[in-house]
Image: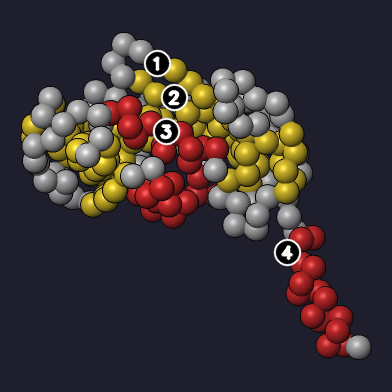
C-alpha cells in the first residue's frame, strides 16, 4: 500500500503543481483570451510585448502565455538597422497575468561591440545595447540563396532551446559567441524580415 501511495504521489505531483495562466496568441493581429495549463518547465504566467523597429517603423505584438523564468524581463536581438525587443511582466500564481506587459525600456550602449551588415558587407561596428552581451550570426536559406545577418543579442535568445528548434524549422541557422567582434565579418545579402517571425514566435511558443 505504501509503495502504491508513493507511486501515485510521484505521478500526480507535477499535475498538482501545474500553473494556470491566461493565454492570448495574436495569430491574426488580435487574439481571444483563454486559459491554459502550463508545462512544468514554463512555470510563470506572463504578459508580453514584442517590439520590432527598422529605423522609422515600429510595430508591437502583445501576448499572454506561460513562460520559463529566464524569459521574464527584457531581451533583444539587434541587427543594426532593425531590432526586436521582447519585454514581459511575470507572476507565479494562477491566472495572475491580467495586466498588460510594460513598454520596453530605453537601453544604453553596454560597451560590447559586434559586426553587423551594411548592404552586402558585414564589417560595420554595432554598439550593443542593454543586456545584449552576445554577438549573433544568423543564416537564412531562402529561394536557393543563403542570407546572413549579424548583430548583438541577449543571452535568452542565444540559449533558448525552443527558439533554436523554431529557427531550425524555419530554415534559420543561428550561432552566438561572446567577445567583441567574435561574429567575424563576411559578405552577405540583406534579409532582415526573415528573422522576425522566429523571434516573435519565442513570445508565442
The Cα atoms of the two marked residues, 4 and 2, are separated by 34 Å
The Cα atoms of the two marked residues, 3 and 4, are separated by 32 Å
Q: Which one is closest to the eye, mark 3 or mark 4?
A: 3
Left/right placement of residue 58 relative to residue 103 reads left
The quarter of the picture where the N terminus appears is: bottom right
Check disc 1 and report the residue beneath it. 58
The quarter of the picture where the C terminus appears is: top right
Label 1: few (<14), some (14–19) or many (≥20) C-alpha neighbours in 10 Å? few
Where does the image place residue 180, in percent across and percent down from the top left?
15, 45
The Cα atoms of the two marked residues, 4 and 1, are separated by 41 Å
Label 4: few (<14), some (14–19) or many (≥20) C-alpha neighbours in 10 Å? few
Q: Which of the numbered marks, if any, corresponds to residue 14? A: 4
Residue at 37%, 50% in the rendered image: 168
Left/right placement of residue 121 relative to residue 89 reads left
Q: Which of the numbered marks, if any, corresponds to residue 149? A: none
Residue at 81%, 81% in the rendered image: 6
Q: How is the image coloured?
A: secondary structure
| Marks 3,4: beta carbons within 8 A | no
Amino acid at each position: 500500500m505504501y509503495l502504491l501511495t508513493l507511486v501515485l504521489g510521484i505521478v500526480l505531483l507535477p499535475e498538482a503543481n501545474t500553473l494556470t495562466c491566461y493565454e492570448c496568441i495574436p495569430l491574426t493581429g488580435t487574439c481571444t483570451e483563454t486559459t491554459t495549463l502550463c508545462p512544468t518547465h514554463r512555470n510563470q504566467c506572463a504578459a508580453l510585448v514584442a517590439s520590432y523597429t527598422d529605423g522609422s517603423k515600429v510595430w508591437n505584438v502583445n501576448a499572454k502565455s506561460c513562460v520559463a523564468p529566464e524569459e521574464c524581463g527584457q531581451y533583444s536581438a539587434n541587427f543594426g538597422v532593425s531590432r526586436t525587443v521582447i519585454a514581459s511582466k511575470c507572476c507565479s500564481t494562477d491566472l495572475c497575468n491580467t495586466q498588460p506587459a510594460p513598454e520596453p525600456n530605453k537601453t544604453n550602449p553596454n560597451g560590447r561591440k559586434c559586426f553587423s551588415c551594411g548592404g552586402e558587407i558585414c564589417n560595420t561596428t554595432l554598439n550593443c545595447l542593454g543586456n545584449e552581451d552576445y554577438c549573433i550570426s544568423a543564416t537564412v536559406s531562402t529561394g536557393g540563396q543563403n542570407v546572413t545577418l549579424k548583430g548583438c543579442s541577449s543571452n535568452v535568445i542565444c540559449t533558448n532551446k525552443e527558439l533554436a528548434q523554431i529557427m531550425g524549422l524555419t530554415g534559420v541557422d543561428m550561432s552566438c559567441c561572446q567577445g567583441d567582434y567574435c561574429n567575424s565579418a563576411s559578405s552577405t545579402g540583406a534579409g532582415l524580415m526573415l528573422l522576425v517571425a522566429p523571434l516573435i514566435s519565442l513570445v508565442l511558443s
